[in-house]
Image (cartoon, rainbow, N blue to C red):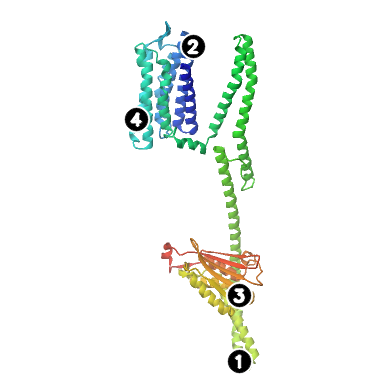
Amino acid sequence: MLVLFHLCAVFLLVGLGFYVFAADPRRRAHQAFAAFISFLALWTVKDLIFWDFYPVDEAAGIWAGTSFLIALLMNFVLVVFAWVFPENSRTPRRKAAILLAPAIIFAPATALGLLWERVGFVDGQFGIKLTPLAYAFVVYVYFLFFYGSIILFNKYRKYRGTESGSQLGAVLLGLAITGALKTAANIVFPLFGNYDLIPLSSIFVLPGVLIYAYAIFNFRLFSLTSALTQFRLFPVAYKVAICIAAVAVSSFLIFQIPISWWAFHNGMDAEAWRRYLVFSLITALIPNLLLVLLVLRTVLRPLKRVTLAAVSVAKGSYGAEVDLRKTNDEIGVLADSFNKMSRKMAEDIEELRLLNERMLRTEKLTAMGTLASGVAREVSEPLEIISAKIEAMRREEGHSNATREDLSLIAAEVSRVSQIIADMRSFGSAKRSINATVSVNDVVHSATRLAGLETGGLRIETNLDARSPNVLGDEDQLVQLVLNLLLHDQQNLRDEDVEITVSTATTAENAVIEIVRSGIGISEPTALESDNASLDLWICHKLVSAHHGTLSAITDAKNCKRFVITLPLLEQKDAARVLTPSSY
């Protein structure tokens, strides 16, 4: 029965230590707990070997010396845990060296058997007689235990009322339970000659260890939330450990038990050992190959796919993704994050490409505006002379009616050219404008009225937003913007089948003006995307940019051209900018 208790204790300790350590291997408190569990597992294995299989005098000295050394190591790890928890601080190496200095004397004395005068069995009863050095060793071990406990208690007072304080309180409770049971089993009862509880001392530690693990695991060790978390993210370390454990247990049940029975059922002679070793080596190949395949499938193959995808991205295949079935381990999270990063990278690069094209188009338009401004300055003087000469000729007597009509037509066209030149000179240089609250609907009304006068009755339908969105800007410039788009390509406006619809709308942050032109004869490509963009669209582009908006043009398969102007809505924070001069 004692064997079962020891075996259960070993498996519980190993599983618990691995679970806590694998949850956060880089956290020092978890590392210290894993070290403590390792020494405690060695303590249990030591008791298992001595009390269940070799309870003889020859093994008693080894058992006693091992017990002293493991007790020293466990309490030293307790002090280290007290130093690093819960802040995840570094171990003070100088203090650690000073505290461990007495071990330089006690460890060799233990190995030489100087801590006891006699240890073994008398009339079937276990007994041990210690030397004064052994009592000094015990005092040193308890000094480490209480020193670590005091550090934890001071931290508990510091963090009381917080989650860290609750964790420290639970750890202190676990230490109290463990210290009381171990002291009773290994010190108090043996002082009165009762050694019956010594074989169970490793069992008495388990309650304190469970509380210990529960505390440093943020009280989630046995909770439903913690169990569900493992389904959301099940670490690769756990999967590999489960594979190894499953293969080991299966191999033991399927191969080792039958081979052992077949080899030793007639006795443990040399031939039996030869059969056992040969067939054990042969059958060991199967579980080992199976274990390699499981590790390859669980770890290496997914990592290879992630690596290939990363190499593809490095070669310029932006947007390449990992072809991997979604899993709930670190590799699955890595693959999913890599795919998101690759898609985002492809989107960002495409956005940069479009932005670069837009910048190039803007530079071309700006260069054309500068060139146009220079040409306007050169043409304006001769044009003024022509205009003055025509005006003088119109005042002269003796011209026929046909000649006067021709002169009036020439004067009108010269005036139109002069206006275009004035616009060219105006937009070729910075101009100061007045920012004010402007109703988008009023802008459309003014522009459509002027367009009707200019074209002699152009059919324009309006569909205006009832909320009448307001923007911050120069009303005259915005009217000119809409008017330029309405009168764009005037030769087609004379077609009776041409229809123009102007609508306004409001989005979360912008006011939108949409101009739709449909009818026969509208088949030319979008001017905004042409290298030879016309002057009126360049002016429109400058006006929209001055108002921090955007202008786009689309021509569909039915020769329907749509201009979309987007302007930022007037916000409360823009109130201070109203009537404040600005330039574009």
Q: Nearer the viewer, residue 373 or 133?
A: 133
Q: Residues within 10 Å of mark 2 (few under 14, many from 20)?
A: few
Q: Earlier in the sequence, mark 2 or mark 3?
A: 2
Residue behind mark 1: 396
Residue in view at x 66 percent, y 72 percent: 521
Q: Position of residue 77 (x, y in %)?
A: 43, 25
> How far apart are the two marked residues, 1 and 3, measured between alpha carbons?
29 Å
Which residue is label 2 attached to? 54
Q: Is residue 253 left or right of residue 506?
A: right
Marks 1, 3: nearer the viewer: 1
**Label 4, residues with CA under 10 Å away: few <14, some 14-19, many ≥20:** some
Residue 153: which disc? 4
Q: Earlier in the sequence, mark 3 or mark 4?
A: 4
Q: Which mark is residue 520?
A: none
Q: Residue 63's image quarter?
A: top left
Question: Relative to residue 382, is residue 82 depicted above or below?
Answer: above
Is tag 4's residue or tag 2's residue first in the polypeptide sequence?
2
522 vs 115, nearest the viewer: 522
**Mark 3: secondary structure:** helix
145 relative to 328 in the view: left or right: left
Task: Tell me the number on the disc at residue 378.
Answer: 3
Q: Amino acid at mark 4?
A: Phe
Could you tell me which secondary element the residue under label 2 belongs to? loop
The amino acid at mark 2 is Tyr
Helix, strand or loop under label 1: loop
Residue 512 image offset from top left, x and y in percent = 52, 65
Inspect this view and state whether residue 424 appears. no
Rendering coords of residue 146 (x, y %): 35, 24
Instruction: Tell me which label, 1 or 2, sits earlier in the chain.
Output: 2
